[in-house]
Every structure is written in C-alpha cells, then in structure tokens.
Image (cartoon, rainbow, N blue to C red):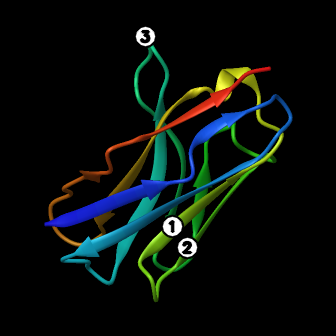
Amino acid sequence: QVQLVESGGGLVQPGGSLNLSCAASGSIFRLNVMGWYRQAPGKQRELVANINSGGDTSYADSAKGRFTISRDNTKNTVYLQMNSLKPEDTAVYYCNYYKLIGIRTDYWGQGTQVTVSS
C-alpha cells in the first residue's frame, strides 16, 4: 500500500501562484510515476502533469508554460509550482502514484482544493 498526503492548496487571486506538495509513504517502488490530476465541479478528473523517477515530465496543454512539476526522490515527494493562475484552474487537485513495473495500480491522495478568484 502507498499513502499520499497533499498540502499547499488554498485561495489565490488570478495571476497568483501556489505550490502543491505530495509526500508518499509505504511500499514505494523505485521505478514509479508521481503526478497531479484535477477535477472541477461537473467535470471529469484530468491529468495536469506527471514525472517519473528518472525525471521525465509530461504536462497537459493547459499547464504548459505556467506549471512546473518536480520531485525529490530522497523524500518521495512531488511538487507542483503553479504560476499565472486562472479562474479555470479552480479544482480539487489530487496526487497520484503508480509503479512502472507490473500491473498498474493507481494510488490517490485525499485531494486539496485550489480556488482562483478575485
């Protein structure tokens, strides 16, 4: 089992910044992917960005140029630096983990609310 604990959400004005953190614990496999998804009211959960244990990253088009994902493998922690936030970024952000070997099993954090509003 893997546990994911997120922090860093909140209320921010348009154009502002937030930094999300997610710490993983438990049975962490060395080769893995950690990332962030988000779900706005009435919409499906969507990938925002992810990063594998080798440092390769992937971003949704909506996140490119504004968000930066990074990780600290020594702490099993992934970060999402969000800049130039827009009202449409408002959503619950979920941390995600899965290992790269074997059958994919997704683990999720409890979610952290990000609200962009003036």
Asked where in the image residue 3 lies, by quadrant, the reply is bottom left
SS for dot 3: loop
Residue found at x 68% / y 21%: 88
- Front-lying residue, 59 or 81: 81
Residue 89 in picture, x, y percent from top left:
65, 29
In this rendering, the answer to whether 2 lies above or below 6 is: below
Residue 105 in picture, x, y percent from top left:
19, 56
Q: Earlier in the sequence, mark 1 or mark 2?
A: 2
Labels 1 and 2 touching (C-beta < 8 A): yes
75 on left or right of 102: right
Residue found at x 49% / y 55%: 7
Mark sitting on residue 66: none
85 on left or right of 110: right
Residue 94 in picture, x, y percent from top left:
42, 44
Amino acid type, mark 2? Arg
How dense is the environment of label 3, judged by Cα within 10 Å: few (below 14), some, or many (20 and up)? few
In this rendering, the answer to whether 64 lies above or below 117 is: below
Residue 111 in picture, x, y percent from top left:
39, 42
SS for dot 2: strand
Asked where in the image residue 14 lies, by quadrant, the reply is top right
Mark sitting on residue 42: 3
Amino acid type, mark 1? Val
Rendered-image quadrant of the N terminus: bottom left
Residue for badge 2: 71
Measured Cα–Cα span from mark 3 to mark 1? 27 Å
Amino acid type, mark 3? Gly
Q: Earlier in the sequence, mark 3 or mark 2?
A: 3
Residue for badge 1: 78
Labels 3 and 2 touching (C-beta < 8 A): no
